[in-house]
Amino acid sequence: MMRQVEPGEEFLLKSQTGIQGFDQITEGGLPKGRITIIVGGPGTGKTLFGMQYLVNGANMYGEPGVFVAFEETKKKLAQNTSSLGFRVNSLIKQKKLHIDHIYIERKEIEETGEYDLEGLFVRLGYAIDSIGAKRVVLDTLEAIFAGFSNENLLRAELRRLFKWLEDKGVSAIVTAERGTETLTRYGLEEYVSDCLIVLDHRINDQISTRRLRVAKYRGSMHGTNEYPYLIDEHGISILPITSIKLDYLASKERISTGIPRLDAMLGGKGYYKGTSILISGSAGTGKSSFALTFANSVCQNGEKCLYVTFEEAPDQVIRNMGSIGIDLRQWIDKGLLKMSAVRSTYYGLETHLVSIHKIIEEFNPSVAIIDPITNLVTVGLPADVKSMLTRLIDYLKGKQITALFTNLTHLGGRIEATQSEISSLMDSWILLRDIELRGERNRGLYVLKSRGMAHSNQIREFLICKNGINLLDIYTGPSDVLTGSARAALEAEEKANAVLRQDEINALGLELEWKRKMAKSQIESLQAELDANEAEIRKRINEAKFKQKTLADERAGMVKMRKVNGTVSK
Amino acid sequence: MISNNPVKDSFKEFKQAAKKIGASNYILRLYISGMTSRSLQAIENLNKICDDELSGRYKLEVIDISQQPESVAKKDIVATPTLVKELPLPIRKIVGDLSERERILVALNLQPRRK
C-alpha cells in the first residue's frame, strides 16, 4: 500500500539492503542517512547482516561501504564471509569496501582524567572519505564499553558519534548485544531511535529457529511480526509473508492427476490448477505413489514439478517408482523434476518454510509436492504447523502453483477428524484407506472433498501394480462394496449364476424347437392321412360315377334294342 | 652488503643498540586531536612528569591525529589524548589528559603499584 505523498513533503528515503525479504517487510530497506541498530544474541547473524548490507550496497546499488570491526580481524571477516560468496577481498581492491579492525584491549589501557573518542571519529572519517562510503557498519560498537570504564563519557561520545554519522550523510548499522533489562546491553537504543531490528534465536524442543523483528522504524510502515530467517550459503534470507490477503486468482484450468479414472472421479478433468490437494491415508496405502504419479504426469506435459520429501532419499524414491513402471530419472535429467530430501527434524518449521520458499523462487515449478506434511508435525506444535502450512499454501496460491500434500493418518480413530486443522486449508482431499475384510487388506480411495467440482462419491478399490496405479471398476453389488478376494468371489458367483441362467435359456430354446418339430411332424402325418383318405374317396366317387353312367348307357341300349317308342331316334 | 666478519659486526650493532636505548630508555608517543585545551593540558602534564622522572632518558613524539588521520589505524587509537608507551615493553596506553600523576607513574612502571 503506497501512501499518498503531498507535494513538497519530505519523504523518508530508504537504503536497500538487497537481503531477500527484508526490503519487502521494511518497504524499501533501512532509513537512508540514518542509523539502524541491529540487536541480537550471539550467533544470530548481526555481523553477517551488516556485511551483506555493505556487499550488496557495493555490488547492486553502487554505494561503497565501511565495515568497522571491533571483534573480528579483517582477515577473519573476509574468510568467514567468503564462504558465503561475498568476494570481500576483490571489493576491497576495487575500493568499494573498506574493512577496519579496531582492537581495544582493556589490559593495555589506563585512564587518567578526561578524554574523548576523537580517535574513532578520525579513523572512521578517514575510512569514509578514502572510498566515498555511503554505508557504514559498526560491529560491535559496544566493545568500547569493555575497553573504557567511564561510562558517562562514553555515552556522551556515542551520542556525538551518531550525530556525526548522520551529518556525514551515511546510512549506518550499529550492532549490539542483547541485554537483560534493556534491549541492548548498554541501552544504545536510547540514542538511536530511527530504526531498531531485533534478531532472535530460539530453541524449542531442540530445534532452533531464527527470527527477525522490526521493533521500531520511525517514519515508515513496516511489518510488525516476527519473520523467520535463514542463514545459508547465500547469506541471510527472510520470509516476508505471515498474512496474505485472500485475493489470489482462481484458475479454471485443470490439471490431470496422472490417473485417468481418478480424473473421472474429479469431475472428469482432474484437479484445478493452483489449488491445494491433500492425500491422506494410513501407512502403506500408496500416498507417495499417488503423489509421484501426479509428478510424472506433470513432467510428461513438459511442466516443472518440485518434490519435497522428508522420508526417503531421492534415489530410493526413483527406485521405488521404477518398480511400478514410472521412470522419474528422465525428468530429473531433463530438469523438469527437482527432488529435495531433508530430514524434517533437521530444521525448525520456519527454516523448512524458508528453504521451501527459496527452492521455489529458484526453480519456479508449476506443481509442488510435500511428502508428507505429517513429519512437520513432529517438529512443531499443531498451531505452528497450521500457521506454517497456511503461509506456504498462501504463497503457493499467490504464485498459482498447484500444491499436493500427503498426510499420514494413524490406524484407528476417525481419519477425517484427526486432521481437521489441516484439511480446512485444502481444496481437494483424497482419502486412501485400507479396507479390511475376510482376512485381507485392500486399498480403496474416495474423494472426501473437492471444491468447485462435481466429484464422485464412490469408494473405489485400486491396485498398485507394475504399470502404476489402477482404479478398478465400480462394483455395485446388492449389499455393499466388496474388495479383494471377496469381490472376486462374488464376481465368480455372479458369473456362475449367469452361466446357469444361460444354460436354462438354451435348454428352453431347445425344448421349444423340439416341440415345434413335433407339432410339425404331427401336422405332416395328418396331412398325409388326409391326402390318403381323399384319394380313396375320390376313387370311390369315380367308381360310382362310372357305374352310374354304365347303368344309363345300358338302359338306353336296351330301349333302342326294344324299339319301345317305334322309332329309334335320339 | 656482505660483511667480512659478521660475528664481530653484529656484536658491535648490539652494543650500539643497547647504548641507544640506554640514552633514551623510554619511547613515548602522545596522540592528540587538534590543539584543544585538553590536548595542551595533556602535553603540559606529560612534560612535567618526564622532566621530573625521566630526565634525559626518554624520547617523546606528539602526533596530532587530525593532521595525520592514517596514523590512528596503526596503533588502534580510539580515544584522545592517548599516551602510548612503546618502550620499554609491555606496551601501555594511557588515556586522558594525564592529570593523575600517581596513576601515570604506575602505568609507566616508574612507581610500584600500591596495594
Image: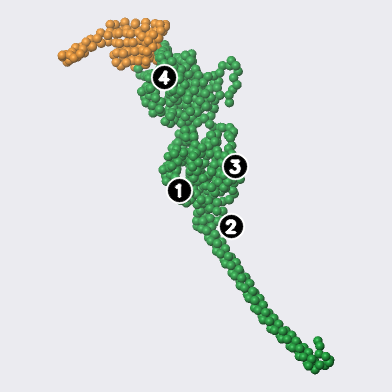
Query: Cα distance, mark 4 to mark 1?
Result: 57 Å
Query: Cα distance, mark 2 to mark 1?
Result: 32 Å
Q: Residue lying farthest bottom?
A: A562
Whether labels 4 and 2 share one chain? yes
In the rendered view, would you say A570 is above or below A292?
A: below
For marks 1 and 3, give the one nearer the viewer: 1
**Label 2 sits on residue:** A477
> Sequence-wise, which precedes: disc 2 or disc 3?
3
Q: Three-letter amino acid code at disc 2?
A: Gly
Q: Which chain does the residue under circle 4 lie in?
A: A
In the rendered view, would you say A123 is above or below B55?
A: below
> Splitting the image into 4 quarters, where does residue A419 fall?
top right
**Label 4 sits on residue:** A96
> Sequence-wise, which precedes: disc 4 or disc 1?
4
Of residues A498 and A191, the one nearer the viewer is A498
**Label 1 sits on residue:** A325
> Sequence-wise, which precedes: disc 1 or disc 3?
1
Query: Cα distance, mark 3 to mark 4?
Result: 55 Å
On screen, residue A138 versus residue A383, left or right, reads left
**Label 3 sits on residue:** A451
Whether labels 1 and 3 share one chain? yes
What residue do we see at 53% from left, 19% from top?
A13
> Sequence-wise, which precedes: disc 4 or disc 2?
4
Give chain B's shade.
orange
Q: Which chain is green?
A: A
Q: Three-letter amino acid code at disc 4?
A: Lys
Q: Position of residue B7 (x, y in %)?
A: 17, 15
Query: Cα distance, mark 1 to mark 3?
Result: 31 Å
Whether labels 3 and 4 share one chain? yes
Q: Which chain does the residue under circle 3 lie in?
A: A
Q: Three-letter amino acid code at disc 1?
A: Gly
